[in-house]
Image (spheres, rainbow, N blue to C red):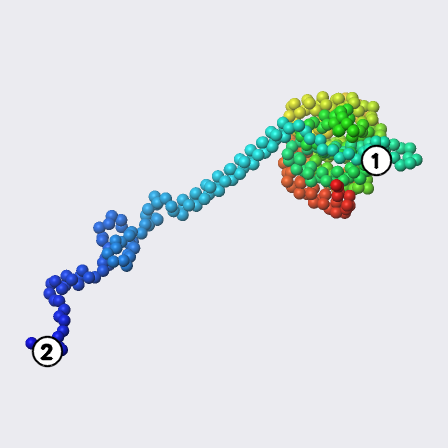
Amino acid sequence: MEAAGNLRLRTPSGPSASRSRVRSRPTDVAPSDSATAGPLIYYPTRYAAAVPRINDAKYPHRFFTKRTILMGSAILAAASVVVMMTWSLLSQALDNWYWNGAEPQWIWDHNIYEPPDNAPGNTTPVRKLLILQRATSPKASKILDATYRLNRAYAKHIQADYVRIDGMLALCDIVFDAINVKVAPEEAWVQYDCIIVLDPDAVFVEFGINMSDMFGPNHLVGIAGNMTDADRYGSGMLWWNTRHRESNAALSLWVDGSFSFHHRDLPKDDITILFDVLRNAYNPPELFTMFQELQPPQVDYFSGTAVRFFRKPSGYERMSRLQWLEADWEDVAIVLEQLVDAICFKSHPKCDLT
C-alpha cells in the first residue's frame, strides 16, 4: 500500500484506451467515394465534409463564366445603341411629321415706317426692302438659329423689314405672298420695292454695306455669283425687284415650274428652278438685262465682304445645296455661331436687340 502523498492517476491502457484516442482526433481526411474527381478544399472545422472546387476548364456548362459575362455586356451595349438610334430616328420622324403638318410661322421685325425716312432735299426715294430668311426643316431651323441674331441686327441697321419663316412653304409662294398678300399685320404691312431672300446659312458680315444699293433698279433678279456656279453649287441669296415690268409674269412661271419640279421630287433648289423656267421663257438677250450677278469680293461664298454662305462641294450632284446643309447641320451651325459671335463682337453693340 502506497503512501497517500505518492498517489498518481493511472492512464487508461489497453484496447479501449486506443479506441478512445482515435475518437478524440479531429477528422482531417476527406471521403474518397465522391463521383467528382478533382482538387478538394479542406476546412479546418471539425467533422466538416469536404467541398469540391469546380474546375472551369472541366465544366464548361457553368453559366456564370467570364465568357458569358463579357458576351452579356456586349449584347447589352449593342441593345443600348440600337435603342438610342431607334429613338433618334423616331424623334426625327415625329419632328418632320409635325413640321410638315404645322402652319408656317412668320416672325417679323418691322423697321420700315410710313412715310419713308428720307433725308431733307434727297430726291432719290428710299427703296423699301424686305429681308426674308426661311427654314424648311427642323435641321435647317437649327442652322437659321445661328444666323438669325446677326441678320435681324443688320436689317434694323439699314431700316429694312426682316421676316423669318419656319415651315414647309415653297420659296416662290413666299415671294408671291410677300408681294401680293398682307402677310404682316394690317397696320405694319408694306408694299415692298425689293425682297432679298436668304438661305438659312447666309449671313451679312458688314454693317456698312447696304445690300439694296448693290442692285440696280432695272434688273429683275440678282444672284450671288454667276448662273453657272449657282446651278452647280447653289446660290445662298436672291434679290427680287418687285417694281420690274416682268415681276408678275416671271413669278407666275416660277410658281408653275416649282410645282412641276417638286412633284417629280428632283434634287433642285427653288432658286435653280427659277433659273430653269426663266431660261425656257426668255431669250438670252432678255435674260442678260433681267439678271444681275454679284461677283467677288462682295460675294465669294464664305470669303465675301458683304454676305457669306457655304458653297456646296463637288460630288453632291444628287443633292441640293439645302439637302447638303441639312446633312452636316451640326458642323455648319458651329461654324456659323463662331462667325456671328466674331462679327457681333467687332460691331458691338449693333447686335444687341431689345
Residue 136 coordinates in the image, percent (x, y): 67, 31
Question: How busy is the neighbourhood of tag 1: few (under 14 within 10 Å), some, or many (20 plus)?
Answer: few
| Quadrant in which the N terminus appears | bottom left
Tags 1 and 2 touching, CB below 8 Å:
no
Q: CA distance from mark 1 to mark 2?
A: 143 Å
Choose top left, top right, bottom left or bottom right for residue 232: top right
Q: Nearer the viewer, residue 314 or 194?
A: 194
Which residue occupies 74% across, 27% down?
Answer: 183
Numbered mark located on residue 341 in the image: none
From the viewer's side, name the closer residue of 113 and 217: 113
Q: Which residue in the protein does label 2 denote?
A: 3
- Label 1 secondary element: helix
- Residue 229 visible somewhere in the drawing: no
- Which residue was labeled with disc 1? 213
Q: Earlier in the sequence, mark 1 or mark 2?
A: 2
Image spot of residue 246 (x, y percent): 81, 23
**What residue is rendered at 71% in x and 39% in y?**
147
Q: Residue at x 89, y 36 (%)?
A: 119
Up/down of 140 relative to 67, above or below? above
Q: Which residue of the protein is positioned furthest toward the left in this rendering?
A: 1
* Quadrant in which the C terminus appears: top right
Which residue type carries mark 2?
Ala
Image height of 130 relative to 14, above or below: above
| Residue type, label 1 | Asp
Query: Helix, strand or loop at disc 2?
Result: loop
